[in-house]
Amino acid sequence: MTTAAALAPLERDLATTGNRAWRRFRRHRLALFGIVAIVLMVLASIVGPWLIPFDQLKIDIRHRFAPPPWGGHLFGTDQLGRDLLVRLLMAGRISLAIGFLAMIVSTAFGTLVGITAGYYGGAIRIVLMRFVDAMLCFPSIFLLLILAAFIQPSVTTITLIIAATSWMEVARVVEAQVRSLRERDFILAAEMIGAPGRYVMFRELLPNAIGPIVVAATLTVARAVLMEAYVSFLGYGIQAPMASWGNMLNNAQQYLGSAPWLAIFPGLMITLSVASFNFVGDGLRDALDARFDVK
Amino acid sequence: MTATAAIAAPVPESPLIEVRELRQWFPVGGGLLRRGDVVRAVDDVSFSIAKGEVLGLVGESGSGKSTLGRAILRMSTPTSGQILFEGRDVTKLGRRALRPLRPRMQFIFQDPFASLNPRMTVRQIVGAPLLIQRPELDGAARDARIGEVLRTVGLSLHYAGRYPHEFSGGQRQRIGIARALILEPAFLVADEPVSALDVSIQAQIVNLLIDIRKELGVAMLFISHDLAVVGHLCDRVAVMYLGRIVEIAPTRALFRRPRHPYTEALFSAVPVPDPTIRRERIILKGDIPSPLAPPSGCAFRGRCRYALPECASAVPPLRQVDGGHWTRCIRDDLKLGRSL
């Protein structure tokens, strides 16, 4: 038997797997909308403030409560005459950065906990996963508020606090995935060559759990943005004069009747970003679900 | 009786691997307060394999073949008994202590679809043993060795960048064999390596294994339920039934004259590709008994057409009937045949 005969032309390649996922994702209209909205928001937050001829901290008492779109203030001004659009975009930098950073920290930590629990099993699994259950039982908003009340609020601390209350979902997803992969033959094969635990965990198991991790991570961004808004709205989060969507809402509530745009625009931004990340998460879940793959 | 079985096991000179009274029991059911039952998947198994020898292990589904193969390579921890590998007791060694021994003993999996990581390329899969066991090798040396072993199994380095799903079942099995061979093991356990493949591919893989044993002189435990394949490849054959070896003999002796009724029944189940031949087929009644509650005495007696009342009294010991030919049947008067 010759090698050439044994290796008939191979039509399929890895690209097809990716293509198939992308095709499924594309069919998900809301997820596409979400991606576009997220990209626009991120770009606008990064570039936008340079393009607008107002400083976010520039107080202009003569033009307080200017309704949009008054004299170049496209979204109006607030009670100190500051341009709302610039503040909204600067707040976007903070809120989205906290969302992404909290996602990275909590996904990394949750993955580590989940993969350790799933791989080692036994007592280690019981201890780790019961800890996850305990954390989930605790109303995370209160935990967030208590922690925020004790710790000096800054972007870093708020990010870490949010991450500390949102890694459990990832841990659960990864643990379940790893536990189901654990007994597969290819993991046994790795054990048979004497592979150390960290090799099996990070080289063999982790790449096979990437799909669920990405989905959980996307949904975590939405959750983190919402939590930052929540904490900041209650005054424990990002402090003035720095803007975040949450503390802009907090600020707006006094003027809800007279200057409703102060509340409407930050509220829309929060809704848009949270909804977009959720849509993308749903789309990814459908696209990466191997059950739809024709084997 | 167990003591005699240990001594009774045929021992060729300087065995590479020696198994003594091996038991692998699994607890089932049971809770915090209640004691559960025990499945005796492997019960009192003794045998040895010489350097370069190929021992076939046959038996129907559920007879404990795979469990035995996995226990010998210490993928599980045996309940009791001893496994000596190159004279060293490996029965109770931990993961770390086993690591330096792993290159010497390797496993070929039954299912070539489940045994290759779908997210790794062929280069990564086949090269992983080198990465772990020979970290001193650089990328070029590793690639050279990967190419060499891929050629041995009839593939080439050309395909090293591809993923498992791009290959057919037979090709995947070759990749699995390449991974097992790359560290040049002295002993291989092949767990039904061809039963998941198309019939047309099976012969190719069996021939590949024959070539490998010729070229590399590797000893093998070849697990199969196909006597024809075993007869083709193996020096000796052990027949397993309900966790025990019921007959073990050199292949020719076993094929010439089986000495256990179960072996005879297995032979009669092998299809003969000639419709003009009329032969008596022994249809076994019922299923293999539950290993939770094995029958008293000979486990096979309920399905055996030669059973006597004495068969129920005690588990028959392995007794020698010929040079190197051992059986667990108490009847010496049987003229068993085979129609292969």
Image: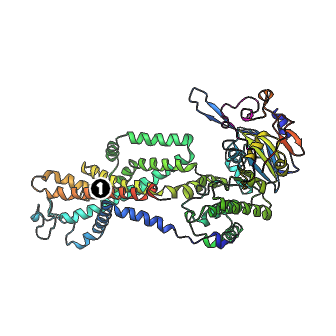
Residue, far right: B323
Label 1: which residue? A274
- Residue A133 in percent (x, y) is at 43, 40
Q: Give percent across and percent down for residue A244.
A: 26, 57
Q: Residue at x 67, y 35 (%)?
A: B291
Residue A36 point in image, percent of width and height:
30, 66
**Residue at point 87%, 49% (across, down):** B12
Q: Position of residue A62 (x, y in %)?
A: 9, 65
| Residue projecting furthest to the front | B276
Which of the two residues, A261 or A39, is positioned nearer the viewer here? A39
Residue at 35% x, 45% y is A147
Q: Is residue A211 inside the magenta stretch?
A: no
Q: Is residue A32 left or right of residue B53?
A: left
Magenta-highlighted residues: B277-303
Give the quadrant of the N terminus of chain A: bottom right
Q: Residues within 10 Å of mark 1 (few under 14, many from 20)?
A: many
Q: Is residue B142 above or below residue A190?
A: below
Disc 1 is attached to a residue of which chain?
A: A
In the depicted view, which residue is nearer to us: B131 or B208?
B208
Q: Is residue A31 left or right of residue B114?
A: left
Can residue A16 be seen in the rendering of this structure?
yes
Residue A246 picture quarter = bottom left
Q: Residue B283 lies in magenta, yes or no? A: yes
Q: Is residue A156 visible?
A: no
Which quadrant of the structure image shows residue B283? top right
Does residue B150 sit above or below B11 in this rendering? below
User: Label 1 sits on what residue type?
Assistant: Val
In this picture, residue A157 sits left or right of residue B90: left
